[in-house]
Amino acid sequence: MKRRMFIKQLALAASVAAIGMGSGSLHAQGKTVKIGVLHSLSGTMAISETVLKDTVLMAVDEINAKGGVMGHKIEPVVVDPASNWPLFAEKARQLLTQDKVAVTFGCWTSVSRKSVLPVYEELNGLLFYPVQYEGEEISKNVFYTGAAPNQQAIPAVEYLMSKDGGSAKRWVLLGTDYVYPRTTNKILRAFLKSKGVAEADIMEEYTPFGHGDYQTIIAKIKKFSSEGKKTAVVSTINGDSNVPFYKELGNQGLKATDVPVVAFSVGEEELRGVDTKPLVGHLAAWNFFMSIKSPANTEWTKQWAAYAKAKNIAGHKDKPLTNDPMEATYIGIYMWKQAVEKAKSFDVDKVRTAMAGQTFKAPSGITSKMDEKNHHLHKAVFIGEVKADGQFNVVWKTKGPVKAQPWSPFILGNDKKKDEPALMAEKKK
């Protein structure tokens, strides 16, 4: 009888202890902790997203080799939402409810992020989103390690307006037809008008995901640019459509000296399959380029080259490339590790609180900081010109990191929006 009572008391004590450990214990049983990797490994976005999966896995290997996180080895759970936006939500729910991941690193397009956002908010999951986007969003369940419009789009257009950038007067806003390009171009249109640009000097065009025939659109751009004023193209084309777009630029002889193109979703990886010689001088705006000269970047490039070779990563084992979203992904996973160690817990609410003000010396050599209020990184901005070898020559940069403005001041009503919604939601919990 006494033995039975003793066993019952042990069981009760164990259950009380488990409850006291909080939700973090669900993620960290058996000295492992699961993390989700939610990137398209097939479909139109695989050209951009696959390498971000590999970046997470490289960081995981590095962290595990040094003892893991709080003594727990990281176990990545990789899923493929296949460039299918509803499938992103399904895979996100699977990661949170079945796999019990402590955090997810994933998404590229804003439509994929918008698809999973209700899932992370409903289930109180944590998502690190590593790509530039249109802003107009703050969630307590998301940390945005890519750029907001004032950290990429606005500086790029200001540069093209300047004497150094060619003093552009007419503008072609060309994008893939979904939320990021349309909202970014809404912001840019308002910004251009605030600078005195007339409606007749703005042309706006959209193409669907996976679009492959840019002959007609390039011809329209050539005609638009021939009407007397210096013209520039702002490209928010996403995914594998960039390959035929840039090939057609070369085919029709549209040179950067005539009509410069600045892209927000084209980096070293997207130019891999393109003959870049006809594209020399066209631009991209990012917060990192592989060609940035810093000891930290030299070391990171070596790490990636060794990892890509060891893991036999397609394309990269022979020609290893790094890019901005890779850096943003890398920053995110290390900041999450630091926040877990500061919180001494994998619990989402505790980790979220510990993320405020986290810093990490990025491969660019610049220390990135997570804003205490708006869940966005402070990031330096670089504008690079395409070189014949597919790399970028940095022609302009900010003096230091720029604080993100998730709510663009160029959209009516945003002057009344602050960074507080994320914090208010946390206080209510």
Image (cartoon, rainbow, N blue to C red):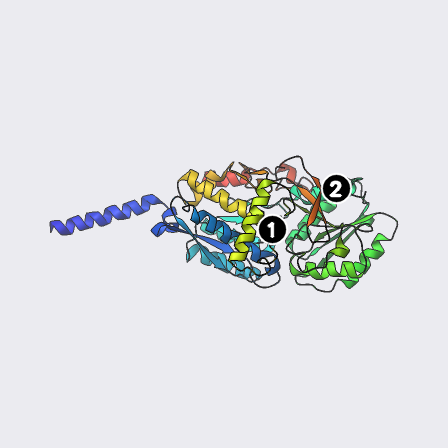
When the figure is inspected, residue 50 is found, relative to residue 347, above or below; the finding is: below
- Report the residue at 55% width, 51% height from top: 304
Q: What amino acid is found at the position of numbered circle 1 in the picture?
A: Thr
Q: Is residue 283 left or right of residue 428?
A: right
- Disc on res. 65: none
Nearer to the camera, 363 or 228: 363
Q: Is residue 10 left or right of residue 87?
A: left
**Helix, strand or loop at mark 1:** loop
Q: Is residue 203 visible?
A: yes
When the figure is inspected, residue 133 is found, relative to residue 367, above or below; the finding is: below
- Disc on res. 322: 1
Labels 2 and 1 touching (C-beta < 8 A):
no
Nearer to the camera, 63 or 44: 63
Classify mark 2: residues with Cα within 10 Å, few (<14), some (14-19) or many (20+): some
Q: Quadrant of the C terminus?
A: top left
Please name the residue that numbered disc 2 is placed on.
159
Q: What amino acid is found at the position of numbered circle 2 in the picture?
A: Tyr
Badge count: 2
